[in-house]
């Protein structure tokens, strides 16, 4: 373990039990600058290698790549504060729970595992995710679920309690997005250019969607019975995770899917079809 | 040789911007903004950083503060002579700077002059009576004609502190904590396609306008042509300066309201304009046609500051939101924040309320009026006024 960095400081790792550990991420330079992310992530990695089941990281302020590449299914990382970009990038099985807001690129290219955010996230959430779950209690920014994909029965899902910005599901090739629009009354719950370039996957929206909000290649559909089953599964997940009850109005659900499996075939070269 | 030449290693990054304004008339210490921008240390690479403070000279609020970077004493003498012919100098002083162990010398000599514009009829572009126009001309002339001198800011009751270094180094160099202002903007630079040098660091300023910019202006050629036709001279070797000239041109010279100017710079797509009511549609189409060359294409998020008629902070991203921007307010709603990352806001206010503004929709906060626009409204709100 890299104790040289941590031991000499008054608020270094304090072991609660053998399976749990708390790491303080706040600044130690006297000027209040946050702890450098290289140092913090090394401390987290050392604790992972020591076989902890729960790593609490407190006082986080913009440190990037927290939990990146973590790949133990029995590990949970709790983040208190504002984690930086690329939280849980390339995540592979671990659970990350954030008590605060996330920034950009949350769950970048994640493979499996869960990221839970008790707050909002900004742009490009779930970029190129291939599996796993991302649950956002409140809202997400632009380009949520961009380039998500699925294969052989495994696919990512993103559940957002509030609203999302433009370019939701841009270049989406697989996976599921659920937007609930809870407590959003004064504005549309999804932005413009939805599903730009999408050719796979599905997005469920609980609320009004106008056809003008969709980009070419995306189409608006009503939900069917199997969709309803999938939505129910995701809803239960959201309710259990955040301890809330969602008032579900099944008539309000709309589904956004690509117009075909190859909506852009021949888009540039008409002779290809 | 198999090893890469110096400077050719991959450096992950992207510029950082941060700003704060006290809308209830209070003062914010320079420490606050330094803490905001240095929290996002990962976004800079030491090739430029800067701060701009508004309301920092309350005793001289009606005089222009011309702040300069000089290569040597000689450049200062020549500038002073040039200034004497064109303005009444009411005072001057050396700007406090100190040695920073990590910042390589030579440092420029930083000097500020307080001045009142002279009325003069034989101005190069014909008689100009507007003192603001005269100061713009003057700054342009010094920057292009006086060797070794650079006017970094020229507004009333504001000054720019910038240089080639990391944001914490520049804060230390100018001892930014000695100033208190009603509004602060700051920038940490990650230059992508222009050199890192002292005058080329942000904020870039003309008159009471200043801009911090993250991104690049793909339409630079067209924008440059537009501002050069209006008499602005591009001398900073960076695309960002056209942004500030366009703001000055559209708002101060052409008299457009701020949301209208913002719409001209990041206009809505035609299919979206189609969906608006007739009157808005007509105006939006006109704006797109008349100010076609003011359209800033490419990824950007910008912070713009202005003093006249009242200290104002404008934060906006391009119409596709290709660069990050977060806005926030303090719990009492007296301080409005904007930054590239939420951590910059959290670093100075743990209880702040934050939100992501819409693409191309400006967040506008003004002293005395508070948050005029949150960036979540219909993009056309405020444009018709």
Image (cartoon, rainbow, N blue to C red):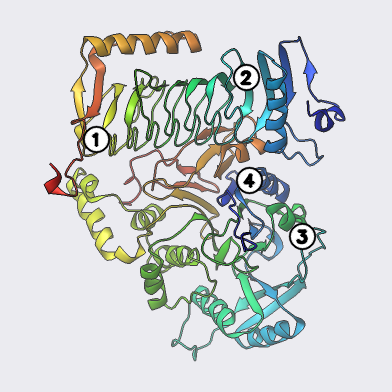
Give the residue pinned by disc 1: A214
**Disc on res. B134:** none
Mark 2 and 3 residues: CB-CB less than 8 Å, in contact?
no
Locate residue B239, reporting x and y percent.
48, 65
Is disc 1 placed on a helix, strand or loop?
Answer: loop
Mark 4 neighbour class, 10 Å CA radius: few under 14, some 14 to 19, many 20 or more:
some
Is residue B291 in sight in this rendering?
no
- Label 4 vs 3, first from the N-terminus: 4
Dot 2: chain letter: A
Quick check: do tags 1 and 4 share a chain? Answer: no
Up the image or down, B96 lies above or below A202; here it is: below
Locate residue B219, reporting x and y percent.
38, 63
Tell me the CA gap for discs 1 and 2. 36 Å
Give the residue pinned by disc 3: B173
Locate residue A243, reporting x and y percent.
49, 8
Mark 3 neighbour class, 10 Å CA radius: few under 14, some 14 to 19, many 20 or more:
many
Tell me the CA gap for discs 4 and 3. 20 Å
Give the residue pinned by disc 4: B42
Up the image or down, A145 lies above or below B261; here it is: above
Q: Residue at x 63, y 23 (%)?
A: A79
Give the residue pinned by disc 2: A78
Tell me the CA gap for discs 2 and 3. 39 Å
Q: Residue at x 35, y 25 (%)?
A: A150
Q: Nearer the viewer, mark 1 or mark 2?
A: 2
Dot 3: chain letter: B
């Amino acid at each position: 373990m890299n104790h040289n960095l941590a031991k000499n400081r008054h608020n270094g790792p304090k072991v609660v039990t053998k399976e749990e550990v708390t790491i303080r991420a706040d600044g130690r330079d006297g000027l209040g600058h946050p702890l450098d992310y290289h140092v913090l992530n090394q401390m987290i990695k050392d604790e992972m290698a020591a076989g902890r089941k729960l790593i609490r990281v407190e006082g986080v302020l913009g440190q990037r790549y927290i939990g990146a590449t973590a790949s133990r299914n029995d590990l949970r990382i709790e983040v208190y504060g504002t984690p930086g970009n690329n939280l849980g990038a390339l995540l592979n099985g671990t659970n990350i729970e954030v008590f605060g807001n996330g920034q950009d690129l949350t769950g970048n290219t994640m493979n499996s595992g869960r990221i839970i955010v008790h707050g909002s996230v900004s742009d490009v959430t779930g970029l190129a995710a291939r599996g796993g779950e991302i649950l956002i209690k409140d809202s997400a920014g632009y380009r949520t679920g961009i380039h998500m994909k699925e294969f052989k029965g495994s696919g990512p899902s993103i559940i957002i309690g509030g609203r999302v910005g433009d370019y939701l599901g841009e270049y989406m090739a697989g996976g599921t997005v659920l937007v609930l629009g809870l407590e959003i009354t004064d504005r549309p719950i999804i932005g413009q250019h939805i599903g730009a370039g999408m050719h796979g996957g599905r997005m469920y929206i609980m609320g009004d969607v106008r056809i003008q909000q969709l980009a070419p290649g995306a189409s608006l559909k009503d939900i069917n019975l199997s969709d309803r089953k999938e939505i129910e599964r995701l809803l239960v997940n959201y309710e259990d995770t955040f301890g809330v009850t969602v008032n579900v109005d099944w008539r309000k659900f709309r589904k956004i899917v690509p117009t075909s499996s190859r909506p852009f075939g021949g888009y540039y070269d008409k002779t290809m079809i | 040789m198999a090893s890469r030449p110096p400077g050719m290693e991959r450096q992950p990054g992207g510029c950082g911007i941060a700003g704060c304004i006290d809308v209830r008339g209070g003062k914010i210490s320079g420490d606050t903004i330094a803490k905001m921008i240095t929290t996002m240390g990962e976004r800079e690479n030491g090739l430029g950083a800067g701060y701009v403070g508004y309301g920092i000279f309350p005793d001289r609020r009606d005089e222009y503060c011309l702040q300069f970077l000089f290569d040597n004493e000689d450049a200062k003498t020549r500038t002073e002579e040039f200034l004497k012919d064109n303005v009444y100098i009411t005072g001057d002083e050396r700007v406090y700077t100190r040695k920073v162990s990590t910042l390589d010398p030579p440092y420029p000599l930083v000097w500020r002059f307080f001045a009142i514009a002279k009325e003069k009829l034989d101005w190069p572009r014909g008689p100009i009576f507007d003192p603001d126009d005269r100061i713009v001309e003057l700054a342009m002339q010094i920057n292009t004609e006086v060797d070794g001198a650079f006017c970094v800011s020229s507004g009333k009751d504001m000054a720019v502190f910038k240089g080639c270094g990391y944001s914490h180094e520049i804060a230390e160099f100018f001892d930014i904590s000695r100033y208190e202002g009603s509004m602060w903007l700051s920038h940490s630079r990650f230059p992508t396609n222009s050199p890192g040098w002292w005058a080329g660091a942000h904020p870039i300023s003309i008159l009471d306008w200043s801009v911090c910019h993250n991104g690049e202006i793909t339409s630079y050629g067209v924008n440059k042509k537009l501002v050069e036709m209006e008499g602005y001279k591009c001398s900073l070797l960076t695309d960002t300066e056209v942004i500030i000239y366009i703001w000055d041109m559209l708002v101060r010279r052409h008299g457009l309201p701020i949301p209208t100017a913002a719409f001209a710079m990041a206009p809505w797509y035609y299919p979206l304009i189609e969906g608006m009511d007739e009157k808005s549609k007509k105006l939006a189409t006109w704006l797109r046609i008349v100010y076609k060359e003011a359209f800033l294409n490419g990824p950007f998020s910008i912070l713009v500051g202005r003093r006249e008629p009242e200290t104002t902070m404008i934060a906006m991203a391009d119409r596709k939101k290709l660069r990050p921007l977060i806005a926030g307010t303090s719990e009492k709603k007296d301080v409005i924040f904007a930054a590239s990352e939420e951590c910059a806001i959290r670093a100075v206010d743990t209880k702040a309320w934050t939100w992501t503004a819409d693409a191309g929709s400006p967040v506008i906060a003004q002293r005395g009026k508070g948050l005029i626009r949150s960036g979540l409204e219909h993009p056309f709100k405020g444009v018709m006024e």
